[in-house]
Amino acid sequence: MLIVALCLSQERNADVSVYAWSKPKSQGGDGTCGMTTGGPSRLFKMGATWLEVPRTDPRFRFGTWTRRPDKLDNIRVRFDRPFVEQSVSVVAFFRGFKMVKGNDEHSRPVWRGEVTVKNVDSTGFEMAISSAQGDFNLEVEVDWVAHMTVDPTVKSGYMTIDHSDQPKFPQTTRCNFNNGEMAANPDYIFQAWSKIDVSAERNMRLIHSASEISKSGFTWKTESWDDTLCWSARGAWIALMK
């Protein structure tokens, strides 16, 4: 399976419509991935991160949820095969979205979207979507990945940026692996956004990268520039050994 996610540079005062796509070889595709945009979006730059994992890999369960504005805002996801351990980790993140500019609780114009995961067990989990205008202005495609927490070859988690005042970029956050170190440095670090809360009066710019990768963790770097005002953001990550 090809898992893909977004990085964006978007012009202010416009709605956003951008999606990443993939053509997995396991489904008859050529193994490529890319991005598409439409509608009123005025994108200066866009990018996608990707991770290719065989769908038959017993360590993982995968899925994609497409949510339309007139549909449910939360669902119970059931794994096609239960895990043998009760302790399971799940990360969920945006593959794409159509986001209408809304207003936050302070009446500020914002682009806001968030996907959250809770009540995880060996059989599945609950996932919810929220946005700035009563959950009606966001159409999304969300990818999710689940694995056993005790698996020494896979680590995952979230990184949060939360600003009550003018944010400063670039910003770095150390992401430490839970439940002990890996046996060696991970072969892959996958990064994605699971929450975006950015002023729509300014251009949106949110780019991420990973550095200082070791057996115990890595450093997440968030970059933005010029006049972007990011109130908060949350990134999902997966560290993987072959």
Image: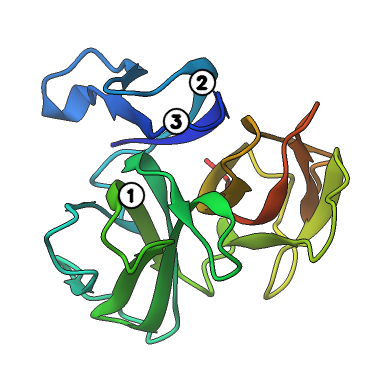
Q: Is residue 155 left or right of residue 78?
A: right
Of the residues shown, which amino acid type is indicated by label 2?
Met
In this rendering, is residue 59 above or below 98?
A: below
Q: Are marks 1 and 2 in contact (CB under 8 Å)?
A: no
Circle 2: element type: strand
For the question of whether residue 236 can be seen, the reply is no
For the question of whether residue 101 can be seen, the reply is yes
Alpha-carbon span between mark 3 and mark 1 = 25 Å
Q: Is residue 221 left or right of residue 3?
A: right
Viewer-nearest of labels 2 and 3? 3
Viewer-nearest of labels 1 and 2? 2
Q: In the rendering, at what x and y percent does residue 160 appear?
A: 69, 62
Q: In the rendering, at what x and y percent does residue 174 appear?
A: 83, 56
Q: Is residue 124 left or right of residue 16?
A: left
In this rendering, is residue 234 above or below 100?
A: below
Q: Residues within 10 Å of mark 2 (few under 14, many from 20)?
A: some
Residue corresponding to mark 3: 14
Query: At 49% across and 18% down in the image, what residue appears?
Result: 43
Circle 3: element type: loop
Query: At 51% across and 22% down in the image, what residue appears?
Result: 47
Viewer-nearest of labels 3 and 1? 3
Q: Earlier in the sequence, mark 3 or mark 1?
A: 3
Q: In the rendering, at what x and y percent does residue 126 appear?
A: 29, 77
Q: Give residue 143's mark.
A: 1
Q: In the rendering, at what x and y percent does residue 148 appear?
A: 44, 71
Q: Is residue 232 left or right of residue 216?
A: left
Q: Residues within 10 Å of mark 1 (few under 14, many from 20)?
A: many
Of the residues shown, which amino acid type is indicated by label 3?
Ala
Residue corresponding to mark 2: 46
Of the residues shown, which amino acid type is indicated by label 1?
Asp
Q: Earlier in the sequence, mark 2 or mark 3?
A: 3
Query: At 56% across and 30% down in the image, what residue appears?
Result: 12
